[in-house]
Amino acid sequence: MERVVVIGGGGAGTAAATITKRLNPALKVSVFTEFTDIAYSPCGIPFVHGREIPSFDDLFLSTVERYREDGLDMRMETVVTDIDLDRRTITTKNEPEGFDQLILCTGFFWEQPDVPGVNLEGIHYVKDIRKSMEFDKQLDSMKRIVVVGAGPVGVEMAGGLAHRGLQVDLVDEGPWVLHEILDPDVAKPVHDSLQARGVTLHLGTKVESFEGDKGGHVCAVHTTDGIFECDAVVTGLHKVPNTALAEAAGLKLGTTGAVSVDDHMRTSAPGVWAAGDVVEIPHGLNMIPIVGLTGAHAYAQGRVAAVNITGGDLAYDPVWVPWGMVAGDYTIGGFSMGENLAKSIGIPYVLAKGVGITKARYYPGAEKTFVKLLAEPDTLRLIGGVIHGGEGVKERCDFLAFAAKRGATLYDLAYMENIYSPPIGALFEPIQIAAQNALAAQRENKLAVA
Amino acid sequence: MSSLSDARRNLRERSEKHLRRAVLSELGRGQPSTVQPYQPKGGRLWRALFVPVYRRVPWSAKERAMGALGMTATGWKAPEREPAEPWRPPADMADRVQAKPAAPTEAASDS
């Protein structure tokens, strides 16, 4: 029987394994993971800590037993230490195991702060649900937490822990939170919302060291803005692709340091595939490889690998990265890139900005939604955008990422159809308003190229 | 990793870091609730030379250079972004719009 080995039990690994088995039940599919659990949503962890979700149990989608019932060979708490591409084996517990096809889904680890004291007890990384369950129990007796890094996870953790009633200091070197994805014109509502929850922001601030008590537990964070005493530290810096196995096996890595794959999720070695946070994927606009995508991307890549392993011919498209989250209580999102990234790369653009409302203006709960679109100066094709405020941010970002991928222009959006139903949508769609404003500016020769 | 791929990765990492830092300082200036980013020591040459030179190069030339240096993905098909000529309003749309009465209010179109 031909054997497919999957290393990693996250979104990409479980998708690759279950879909491979479903498409070809004759295959033996083995999943190796170093963790105890599988098929849970790590993205939900900050909201359990924040008591917005009642229990960690709610994050589990399935069980190991269920996967076994479906015919998968589940190797839990089993670390793969080596891949031998010549012999077509992996090594676990000093024993070789053969494979015919290998899918590498080893995910990521969190970047560690490069400062003294980083190995103290009480410095927590949001990833493994078992460790998070333990941390959650400890939080009951804690009062003050320092969150290092105002990226998406750091912001969610800071907002969640403050919601739980803890005193939270959020420290970041950047000039506003989420500065790698968010434009500065959105900083104020985001900061206001976090501060309303009780988060104290220390921006433009570098962590210099972690101080430990006599027991070796972190008790303070030394920064350029002063010393913050704490009971624990939560870090939320960058995701780093976990490529140790791939690199040791000689697989080609790309310019981000992640595993290089083609659009079928094939690595540089025959019969070896990779998906999820361990790989880099080109951005649809410029074909520059990027990392740090979402669980939805990981699952879709795992599916592509599975289809192709079982004889299909499915290509994964370059990505336009719709994203969204709630920072404090304020909803923000975007797709592809905002001004911040476009300016950094040096891509010229024109702006289309507009403010609409989420429901009919007379319907209770109507809120403002702010739309900023970036378009190519000559064709007015969409290249990115940032949306914030109220309901529907996620849906607008999903739609706009798809529209950009298909080459939609501001002309298309200015005259798009939209739903008008008082409880869910106003007469004028905010996206339309932004695009119309840009066309009006163009007619008056006021559409400036940035 | 080969020294070439190490060099590519290093180039990307450093150039991105300095380009992004420069933009953060500029874009955030004057925006409410923002501060100046932390400025680490070092990287003076990148700030003083690389960033200004990079910015003077047109995007089309940058794209070509990135491709030549192997900074873009291989084994992928660049997306077709022109499935059809996008719809555009007639040339005299501006006149027509101005000739029409103001857009109806929501209340007027409630039914």
Image: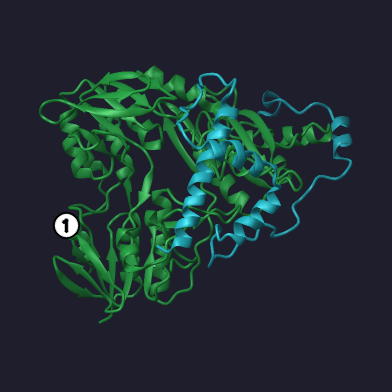
Query: Is residue A53 visible from the viewing direction of this image?
Result: no
For residue A213, side relative to residue A384 (left or right): left
Image location of residue B65, percent across then percent down: 64, 56
Residue at the spot 81% in from the left edge and 45% down from the top edge: B89
Q: Amino acid at mark 1?
A: Glu
Residue at the spot 42% in from the left edge and 65% down from the top edge: A252
Q: Is residue B45 above or below residue A301?
A: above
In the rendered view of the protein, which quadrant contains the C terminus of chain A?
top right
Residue at the spot 37% in from the left edge and 56% down from the top edge: A278
Report the colour scheme: by chain
Image location of residue A216, percent across then percent down: 14, 31
Q: Local crowd at mark 1 within 10 Å, few (<14), some, or many (≥20)?
A: few
- For label 1, the residue is A77
Image location of residue B73, percent across then percent down: 54, 61
Q: Which chain did the image draw in green?
A: A
In the rendered view of the protein, which quadrant contains the N terminus of chain A?
bottom left
Q: Is residue A134 above or below residue A184?
A: below
Q: Colour of chain B?
A: cyan
Question: Which residue sits furthest left?
Answer: A215
Q: Is residue A65 above or below residue A363?
A: below
Question: Which residue sits furthest bottom?
Answer: A1
